[in-house]
């Protein structure tokens, strides 16, 4: 019996890949089902057994955003993660809720719009570059927008910004119309409605963002008016063309309105005297 199992083990096809952990879900007790984006195979779904047990050698690689060298055994359904060696844990992203949230935006976008085995050229390198930059950037929101725009471009679904999709007129701004895939000039725009205005300055900012030049992004200054236009354009474009609303983006945007609850003074609090504050 033991010899038979040993033969089956050696007969199981195996492979290795370098990948980033996008999400980890509970699976069969102490196991986890991992979604990983890899350089070699694109999106990989793999089961990792025993992650919840103390001393698991696979547990570090199951942490979100972790970059690892991974070893898999092919199986019916999901493959099995058998070994992992962490290359970069990206600890700072898990210590700052804002950076954590924006890192999760990129991971969720890839996971929800990519099929297992689908490999987008250069996406792995851009993702790793993005996570490194997110650890230190002074403008995490701008960096996140830049990643989203770059991902749309790499997927062949980027918004048309440099010319009107209707008449071909170049670089004049206008209104964003999702059904037309870009910014329509005012002459071609539909009757006044809910379509958001996009100024020529905002168009230039969007063009700079989707080049994903990290040094340029750090120098980029985005006025509040442009931020509102950019936020709506990217959100609406992703919803219309990818049919996705990013939960992680809503989470991180709500962080700005969160306030720590005020601590109620205890009975022994010196500020209280006969039930009244001094």
Image: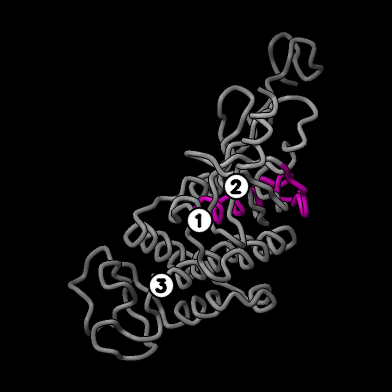
Other residues around mark 2 within 10 Å, as few (<14) / some (14–19) / many (≥20): few
Can you identify the residue that label 2 sits on? Answer: 13
**Side of 272 relative to 197 (left or right):** right
Other residues around mark 3 within 10 Å, as few (<14) / some (14–19) / many (≥20): few
Can you identify the residue that label 1 sits on? Answer: 110
Numbered marks: total: 3
Q: Secondary structure at mark 1?
A: helix
In terms of depth relative to the viewer, which is nearer, 33 or 171?
33
Residues tagged 3 and 1 counted as in contact (Cβ below 8 A) = no
Residue found farthest to the bottom? 169
Which tag is nearer the camera, tag 3 or tag 2?
A: 2
Figure quadrant of the C terminus: top right
In terms of depth relative to the viewer, which is nearer, 25 or 119?
119
Is the stretch drawn in magenta largely helix, strand or loop?
Answer: helix
- Residue at left offset 72%, top offset 18%: 265
- Residue at left offset 39%, top offset 73%: 159
- Residue at left offset 26%, top offset 63%: 194
Can you identify the residue that label 3 sits on? Answer: 156
How far from the left and from the top, in percent, is residue 189? Answer: 23, 77
Figure quadrant of the N terminus: top right
Q: Which residues are magenta?
A: 83-109
Residues tagged 3 and 2 counted as in contact (Cβ below 8 A) = no
Q: CA distance from mark 1 to mark 2?
A: 27 Å
């Amino acid at each position: 019996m033991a010899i038979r199992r040993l033969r089956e083990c050696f007969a199981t096809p195996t492979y290795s890949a370098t990948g980033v952990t996008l999400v980890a879900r509970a699976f069969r007790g102490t196991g986890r089902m991992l979604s990983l984006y890899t350089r070699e195979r694109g999106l990989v779904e793999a089961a990792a057994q025993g992650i919840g047990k103390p001393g698991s050698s696979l547990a570090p690689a199951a942490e979100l955003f972790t970059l690892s060298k991974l070893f898999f055994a092919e199986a019916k359904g999901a493959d099995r993660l058998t070994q992992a060696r962490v290359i970069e844990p990206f600890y700072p992203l898990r210590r700052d809720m804002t950076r954590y949230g924006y890192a999760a935006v990129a991971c969720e976008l890839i996971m929800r719009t990519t099929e297992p085995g689908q490999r987008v050229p250069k996406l792995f390198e851009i993702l790793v570059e993005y996570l490194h930059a997110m650890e230190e950037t002074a403008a995490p929101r701008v960096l996140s927008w830049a990643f989203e725009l770059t991902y749309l471009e790499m997927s062949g679904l980027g918004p048309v910004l440099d010319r009107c999709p209707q008449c071909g007129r170049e670089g004049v701004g206008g209104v964003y119309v999702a059904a037309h895939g870009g910014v329509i000039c005012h002459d071609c725009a539909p009757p006044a409605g809910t379509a958001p205005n996009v100024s020529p300055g905002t168009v230039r900012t969007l063009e700079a963002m989707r080049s994903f030049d990290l040094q340029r992004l750090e120098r980029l200054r985005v006025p509040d008016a442009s931020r509102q236009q950019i936020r709506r354009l990217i959100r609406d474009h992703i919803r219309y063309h990818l049919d996705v609303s990013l939960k992680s983006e809503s989470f991180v945007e709500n962080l700005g309105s969160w306030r720590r609850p005020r601590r109620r003074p205890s009975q022994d609090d010196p500020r209280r005297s006969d039930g009244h504050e001094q």
